Amino acid sequence: MNWYEKLSKYFPIEEMKSKEHMELLLKEKADVYFKDESEEHVLMYAEFDHFLFIDYVYVAAKTRGQGIGGKLIDKLKKRAKPILLEVEPLQYEDSDSQKRLRFYEKQGFQHAKMIGYNRRSLATAEENPMEILYWAPNGETEEEIFAAMRDMYEQIHTYKDKQLYGESYQESDEVLTFSKDTEKDSIFDTLKENQK
């Protein structure tokens, strides 16, 4: 199974970029978009001057719990830049969702409670709300994380979208919102409360 097949079997269709999109990023944005893979994992990420964005991380089921994911995150942390990623909202019936959140919490990630993220999937035409998690080694604020997410969205998610999909993703202003007044509950606190 190649790297794209591994990702597309693990991630829902509404979260997946096309293979052509990722290959174009790897080729035309080779200075910022990278693939790290082995038999046990696939990591797709973007590295900018001031932050990193994990686009996809996959660890083979047979090797989960053996520290591979932690080693991949540690490798990125050594760059001493904020690390951002998207996760689906907590789904109580999905044990993978809960395990994933516990993993990121253990890795020191925080939930961006002031950032809203809701993108329409070009594959399904349905709204796809996501939560933003981040690791802030230098005490970066949620406002700084929000600015980084906008930058990433415009440079990675929407890269040549019209050419690749026949239509464009929404503008970043429609997808990402920031509100100091409407702070959500921490996804990690919600996870802990539901485990009691």
Image: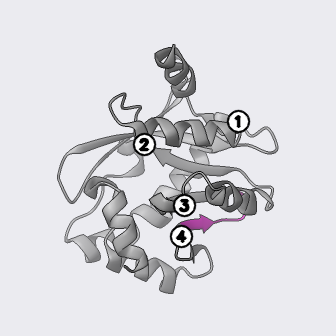
Residue 105: image x %, image y %? 63, 36
Mark identifier at residue 70: none
Q: Residue at x 27, y 71 (%)?
A: 162
Q: Is residue 54 above or below residue 113?
A: below
Can you identify the residue that label 3 sits on?
63
Q: Is residue 51 visible?
A: no
- The boundaries of the magenta stretch are 44-51
Residue 188 in view:
yes
Alpha carbon distance from label 4 to label 1: 34 Å
Residue type, mark 4 in image: Glu
Q: Which residue is mark 1?
A: 141
| In this rendering, the label closer to the viewer, 4 or 1 | 4
Q: CA distance from mark 2 to mark 1?
A: 29 Å
Q: Could you tell whether 70 is left or right of 171 in the image? A: right
Residue 46 part of the magenta segment: yes
Q: CA distance from mark 4 to mark 3?
A: 7 Å
Q: CA distance from mark 3 to mark 2?
A: 14 Å
Q: Residue at x 47, y 77 (%)?
A: 25
Give the amino acid type for the residue marked by disc 2 in the picture. Answer: Asp
Q: Secondary structure at mark 4?
A: loop
Q: Amino acid at mark 3?
A: Thr
In the rendered image, residue 15, in percent from the top left (x then y), is placed at: 34, 55
**Residue to which mark 4 is pinned:** 40
CA separation, marks 4 and 2?
A: 17 Å
Q: Residue furthest front?
A: 62
Find residue 96 and name its label. 2
